[in-house]
Image (cartoon, rainbow, N blue to C red):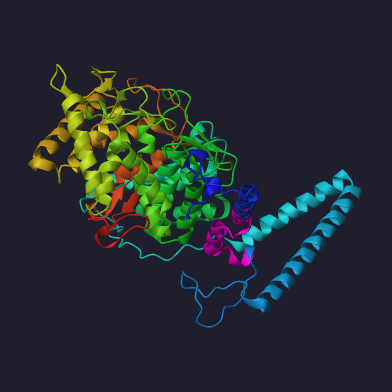
Amino acid sequence: MTTPALLPLSGRRIPTLSPGAASFPHHRATLRLSEKFILLLILSAFITLCFGAFFFLPDNSKHKRFDLGLEDVLIPHIEAPKGAKHPGGQVVIHGQGDHDEHRHREEEESLRDKIRADHERALQEAKEKLRKSRDELRAEIQTEKSKVLEDLKKEGPKPLPPVPMPKVVGVNDGDPGEPDIKEKRDKIREMMKHAWDSYRQYGWGHNELKPLAKKGHSTNIFGNSQMGATIVDALDSLYMMGLHDEFKDGQEWIEQNLDFSVNAEVSVFEVNIRFIGGLLAAYYLSGQEVFKVKAVQLAEKLLPAFNTPTGIPWAMVNLKSGVGRNWGWASAGSSILAEFGTLHMEFVHLTYLTGNPAYYQKVMHIRKLLAKMDRPNGLYPNYLNPRTGRWGQHHTSVGGLGDSFYEYLLKAWLMSDKTDTEARKTYDDAIEAIERHLIRKSNGGLTFIGEWKNGHLERKMGHLTCFAGGMFALGADGSPDDKAGHYLQLGAEIAHTCHESYDRTGLNAALGLLLQAIDKYCRVSGGFSGVKDVYSSNPTYDDVQQSFFLAETLKYLYLLFSSDELMPLESWVFNTEAHPLPVLHLANLTLPGSQAQR
């Protein structure tokens, strides 16, 4: 059926008029106007209905919010009839029937009365505050602060979920058996006690010690805070050496004084390897829960550093405000490969111990982002801008700025009981590019690892690169294409080069002589100090006893003069600050937020 009023004029059929029917055309015109009016009326009603539906029908997004567990906050909860179920399986029904509507009205009115009463009470309290003097207000604020702090102390730290403790193998006496070796080991233990006792007497609670000035010391990597870096860094060394009274003193200080709610800007990298690594190692060695709790508290303070457009963390973060930034000298505000690439071991253990997937996901995101990026000649530049996700200056080094990134790729594989094959392949690919483009021989026949800068090889090797000899040897087992023997040989050649670089100084570096040289040239009455010029037989001191002297130098020397059973490397992996973390047998374990590793 057609509607003439809606057809164009050229398409209409006009009926033939008969004589005497003059009123008919007039009557048809009236009908057409009526039809128009009726159609406009219907259209108006339809539009009104649509707008009404748009503004007044329930909003699905609100229902979604209720399903997230906010039912009892946004809508008063009403018990459902037996058998009626929420889509998620929970029995939740709101506002069904007249009884429920009446109950809603009562509860809404009650809520309004409560809000009105709270408002009146707040106004009255404000009026009373205005009548008080400034001194009274200050005293009242201080009282409230003290009360809050007292309540926080009473509440204590949030308990962490129980997890199976990895089987701790070793950590026994490690007696080497041979009397002359045992004598050297005992000497190292005595040096450790001298370093610790001096710090205990002159720098207790400070981050480090000035052994000549006999007072506390700190560097900008710890901000302006007194966080007891030497205490945390030395704990596992004390435990391994059987200095249990000293270990207990350190534990008591941590329980009573170690507080991360300080207005201090710290290095994410340094705090991770020294504090989180040190606390986790102390926990695994001793089983004392306080170390695990403190490690998690600190890790929570570091997480805001990852709030960048790319997820690559800032170099520094303020522990109180969570604001991060990068070193001003680092290639136009870039993050540094050896810093953001040296978090994996500790963060995997944090997820294992807490069940919180955030830590694991943060470090895996870094790995996946790097895997997608183009790399010049297969090499990883030392600088990456966390805002743009682009490389900074094309400078590649296996020494400073790059070193521990490669170390942690290999150790992530070892720590996973060799199941993290992605880490192993990334390591193998990186080492292949390094060998092709950076490793050369000097005119004197010494193998060295140079640095790549803007398309050119710089034929120099920094002392921080010396770790690579051990890394090549450690990674030889599991190398592709049966290259184990090749990498063992390459590691030995790099180690020989490093030995020569020390042996040709005035202080000598043979292992036994090294121990004597440290004790002779670095020991002072207030501890041990670094020397400024190793070529001088009468060196001047820098007057700093670094925390890593207790964490790394003395620990590694002690292990070298101990039996392998003290810390068997099949069961432990050392982080880059020499803190041992147990191998996690992940073949039958899926970390929260990860896929099962095979």
In-front residue for pair 309/99: 99
Q: Residue at 65%, 69% (x, y): give it.
A: 76
Is any atom of residue 194 visible in this view?
Answer: no
Q: Quadrant of the C terminus?
A: bottom left
State which region is magenta: 46-73
Question: Left or right of 326: which side holds 55?
Answer: right
Is any atom of residue 386 visible in this view?
Answer: yes
Question: Left or right of 178: which side holds 9?
Answer: right
Q: Residue at 80%, 65% (x, y): give it.
A: 113
In the image, residue 279 lies at what x, y percent? Answer: 43, 51
Question: Left or right of 106: which side holds 318?
Answer: left
Q: Is residue 154 above or below residue 449?
A: below
Question: Left or right of 272: which side holds 464?
Answer: left
What is the residue that sits farthest to the front in this orientation?
19
Q: In which image quadrant can residue 353 be found?
A: bottom left
Magenta-colored stretch includes residue 58: yes
Dominant SS type (magenta):
helix
In-front residue for pair 516/5: 5
Q: Is residue 50 above or below residue 380?
A: below
What is the residue that sits farthest to the bottom in this orientation?
82
In the image, residue 188 lies at what x, y percent? Answer: 34, 44
Magenta-colored stretch includes residue 229: no
In the image, residue 59 lies at what x, y percent? Answer: 57, 58
Q: Residue at 44%, 26% (x, y): give it.
A: 541
In-front residue for pair 183/137: 137
What is the residue that sits farthest to the right in this orientation?
131
In the image, residue 86 lies at what x, y percent? Answer: 50, 72
